[in-house]
Structure formats: structure tokens, C-alpha cells
Amino acid sequence: MELENRTGSAKDRAAIWILREAMRRGEITRSTTVVESSSGNFALALASFLNELDVPFVPVLDPNVNAATERTLRQLCARVEKVTEPDGTGGYLLSRLARVTELRAELPDVYWPNQYSNPDGARGHYELTARELLEDVGRIDYLFVGSAPVRRSTASRRLGEEHRMPPWSPSTSRARPSSVPRRPAGGSRHRIQHPSAADRRRLDQEGGRAVRAGRGGRLPGSAA
């Protein structure tokens, strides 16, 4: 589904909603420069939309950005910042954010989307991602949601509450490992933690039930 987005990433959904709301509130105008920290995809989404609007954008990247993304950003943006010094955690996130702070002080009219805590990002997934799933599928019996990024899991949870999805309804099952693989906020690479044996057994059992029901021509919980 996300391949159909403008830049082929789920980040497009959060980006367009954040920009839409900021423009609606008057926080972004023709004279504004948008500055954001990103390891790649979110910056690419912002650059694509802002380039069409003729609004300057300065992405703040780090050495982990892939070469193709960086080349595209340098084509779309007149100015690209790239930090090179890791922060105290061994990653680059805090270094990127420090550079964003400097740019906000340096430039006269700056909007910082702050993708890490902007509620408009979660709202974008609520209005676009989660709602699109619900409208296309109609009924959701099994919902698998990664815990990161928080924007997508928050949006899915809110939509689930409104439509009596897990764990509010016995007709829908939710499987969530107790230990979720993820990269810490600092951006450094740590050993991946895998789901516990009990989690794996539960996922296997629920997956097996879904497969058996699918072979019978119906989804779990549906009428015979």
C-alpha cells in the first residue's frame, strides 16, 4: 500500500498532514524555511511536497542516510545539512537535533515539524493510514501493529477504540510481542531482542488458525 505514496514510504502520510495543518494555522508561508532532522524517508517526503509548494526546506541528515536518498535531497533542496559527529549515545539523533536548534536561531522564519512529538503526525496516520485500512477491508479480525514509530501505533489504537477493535471486542485478535525489535532513540545499533517463546507460540497458534480458516474460505469469526 505504501508503495503507492509519492515517495513510496509511510512517512508521506505523516509529512503531508503535518504540513497541511501547519499551513492551515499560518505557521508555514511563502517566506518560511522548513528545517527538520531525519535519517532519510521523512526528509524525502517533506522535500517532495515542499518543492511543489516552492517552500525552502533544509534537511538535517547524518552518515546513515543512504546514498540515493541523499542525492535526491540534494537535487530538491538548495541547502542540505549533514552532521558527522555522533552524540553521547553513539548515534546521531541528538547531533541532528542540536543542528536543527542552531538553524532555527540562524534563519529568520523557520518552521520545525518535529516529527518525533508532533501530534499532527499521529493524526495523519489516523485519518489516512488506519482509516484507509478500515474502509478497504471493512472488518479487521487480526491487527498486527509495530510499536515503532509511535505515530502509526497511536493512530491504529485510536481507530481501534472508535470501532471496537482489539482488545475492546472479542471478534478481533491482536498479537503484540512483549519484546519488540527497534533501534533506540539515539540511533545506535544494538542487539535485536526477539519475542519470547510464549509470544512465538501464541503468534504461531493464531497464524495457524487464520490459515486453516482461509483454506475453508472464510476468516476467523465470520459466519459459516
Image (cartoon, rainbow, N blue to C red):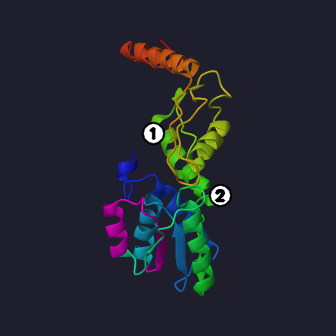
Label 2 Cα crowd, 10 Å radius (few <14 / some 14-19 / many 20+): some
Left or right: 113 in relation to 135: right
Residue 47 place in picture, x, y as percent: 43, 70
Q: Is residue 105 above or below residue 206?
A: below
| Nearest the eye: 102 or 131 | 102
Q: Is residue 53 left or right of residue 143?
A: left
Q: Is residue 75 above or below residue 174?
A: below
Q: Dot 1: few (<14), some (14–19), or many (≥20) neighbours within 10 Å?
A: few
Q: Earlier in the sequence, mark 1 or mark 2?
A: 2
What residue lies at 52% left-to-right and 16% top-to-bottom?
201
The amino acid marked with disc number 1 is Asp
User: Residue 57 location, x and y as percent?
Assistant: 47, 76
Q: Quadrant of residue 7?
A: bottom left
Whether label 1 touches label 2, CB < 8 Å: no
Q: Is residue 95 visible?
A: yes
Of the pair 30 and 195, the residue shown nearer to us: 195
Instruction: Quickly name the residue at label 1.
Output: 136
Going by the numbered disc 2, the residue's amino acid type is: Pro
**192 or 111: which is nearer to us?**
192
Tell me where the magenta segment starts and ends, as one range: 54-75
Residue 157: mark: none
**Marker disc for residue 119:** 2
